[in-house]
Image (tube, grey):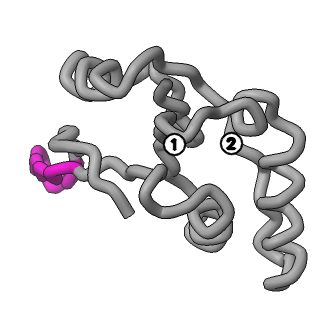
Amino acid sequence: MFFNISNHPTSQWGKKQLEEAQKFGEVVDVPFPNVDPHINDVEMENLAKTFCQSNPEIINASAEDVFHVMGETGFIFALVVLLGRQRCVHSTTQRKSLEKDGVKTSIFEFVQFRRF
């Protein structure tokens, strides 16, 4: 299975990203927690542990399952440490900038999943 732990549900992904995720198996969204920017290191580690322990998808995951983790950097690091870096992937993108009438807009196009 492919567990998407991010603020970007797979229903909002482009065709290419979803097809690449499906190569790992069934795709399941796991809601990303609200991470308080004021918590300290110990609280961050505890948040990651509690997150893992309170999500049946994570508790029941097999060794072959993959976790797509994207979001708040400190939380992601703590989560990758807990889950094991070989089981975790992140998205890579190509940024394309468009400028119109003095307004610059960036569009991020999915390229691949990369293991941590």
Magenta region: 93-106
* Relative to 75, 47 lies left or right: right
**Residue visible at 47% across and 39% down in the picture:** 66
SS for dot 2: loop
Q: Is residue 101 magenta?
A: yes
Label 2 environment density (alpha carbons within 10 Å; few <14, some 14–19, many ≥20): some
Select label 2 or label 1 by which is in front.
1
Label placed on residue 32: 2
Q: Position of residue 35 (x, y in %)?
A: 77, 59
- What residue type is disc 1 on? Phe
Q: Position of residue 21 (x, y in %)?
A: 33, 27
SS for dot 1: strand
**Residue visible at 54% across and 32% down in the picture:** 3
In which quarter of the view is residue 110 placed? top left
Q: Nearer the viewer, residue 40 or 103?
A: 40
* Relative to 38, 19 lies left or right: left
Which residue is disc 1 drawn over?
67
- What residue type is disc 2 on? Phe
Q: Nearer the viewer, residue 22 or 93?
A: 22
Q: Position of residue 112 (x, y in %)?
A: 20, 43
**Residue visible at 51% across and 49% down in the picture:** 69
Label placed on residue 105: none
Q: Is residue 104 magenta?
A: yes
**Residue visible at 53% across and 26% down in the picture:** 9
Quadrant where the C terminus is found in the figure: bottom left
